[in-house]
Image: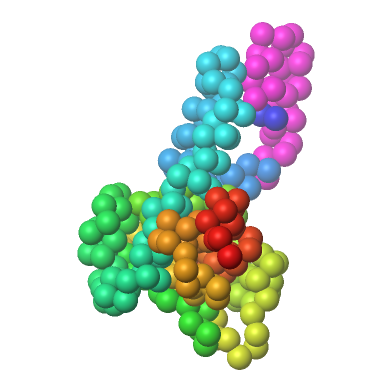
Amino acid sequence: MSGHSHADDSHSHVRHDHEHSHDHGHSHDHEHDNHFEPIEARVRALETILTEKGLIDPAAIDVIVDTYQNEIGPRNGASVVAKAWTDPEFAAWLADDATAAIDSLGFMGRQGEHMRAVFNTPEVHNVVVCTLCSCYPWPVLGLPPVWYKSPPYRSRVVLEPRAVLAEFGLELPDDVQVKVWDSTAELRYLVIPMRPDGTEDMTVEQLARLVSRDSMIGTAQALNPGAATDSVAAGSAT
Ligand code: FE
C-alpha cells in the first residue's frame, strides 16, 4: 500500500503531488499505526525499504516468522509442560520458582528472565495478556502471534475473557474460574495446560506434541491424543 506510492517516486510530479495531498487528507489513518512500539515501527520501515529495493521477499519473511511463532519457538515451552506433566518434582519446582526450573532446561534469555508458571486445573483456567504492549516469554514461546499484540485482544480479554476464549473455540463451563494474568517487562507467564486424558502411556516427546502455543497462552487446551500428529498415532500398538 504505502510501498506503492513510495516506489512511484520517479513518476510525474502531478502524480507525486496527488499522493501527497491524498496522504494529508487521510492523516487520521496514521493514528492506527500509533500502537506500534518503536522497534516494530522501525522493523516495518526497514522491511518496506528492503522490499522496494528488491533485496527481500516479504513472503519469505512471513514464512520464517510463522515458523518461529508456531513451530520452533513454542517447542521449548511444550517441553517444559511435558516435563511438568511427567515429573512431579519438576512441576513443584516450576510452581515455586519457574525462572530457575525453566533455566535448568536451558530455556533462558532475554524477555524471559522472570517467569511464573500458572497451572490450569479443573477449577481454574489461566490466560495471559499484556495490556500495555506485547510482553511475552520469548525463550519458551518464541515470537508473539499478531493477535496477542492486537489492541482488541489486549483490552477485551480482561473485560470479557470468556467471550474472547469462546472466539478462539474454547468454551469453558460456567463453574470454571478464569484468571487473566497481565504480563509486564518484569514478569512473564507460562500457562501449564491440563494433561489430556488417555495420555498415560505416552512419552515426554509425544506429550510435548500435544502442547500448542495457544495452550501455553491460555487461549486453547492441550490437544487430545487423537488430534496429535501421525507419529504419535504410530506409537501405539494396541
Ligand atoms: Fe508488554
Viewed as shown, does residue 16 lie left or right of 114?
A: right
Prevailing secondary structure class for the magenta stretch in the rendered image: helix
In this picture, is 238 found above or below 112? Answer: below
> Residue 37: x percent and y percent?
47, 47
Magenta stretch holds residue 22: yes
Name the image quarter holding the N terminus.
top right
Magenta stretch holds residue 62: no
Instruction: Give the camera-side residue of 144 and 176.
Output: 176
Q: Is residue 30 visible?
A: yes
In this picture, is 146 found above or below 212? Answer: above
Q: Which of the 4 image quarters holds residue 80?
A: bottom left
Name the image quarter holding the C terminus.
bottom right
In this picture, is 221 found above or below 42? Answer: below
Residue ID at (59%, 44%) = 33
Q: Residue furthest bottom?
A: 175
Instruction: Give the camera-side residue of 213 and 46.
Output: 213
Viewed as shown, does residue 32 lie left or right of 25?
A: left
Viewed as shown, does residue 200 lie left or right of 12?
A: left
Viewed as shown, does residue 185 lie left or right of 69?
A: left
Residue ID at (76%, 16%) = 15
In this picture, is 200 found above or below 232? Answer: below
Instruction: Give the camera-side residue of 51 and 189.
Output: 189
> Residue 96: x percent and y percent?
26, 76
Residue ID at (43%, 56%) = 205
> Residue 60: x percent and y percent?
57, 28
- The type of colouring in the image is rainbow
> Residue 94: x percent and y percent?
30, 71
Residue ID at (52%, 56%) = 235
Q: Which of the 4 image quarters holds residue 27?
A: top right
Q: Is residue 182 visible?
A: no
- Magenta-drawn segment: 3-28
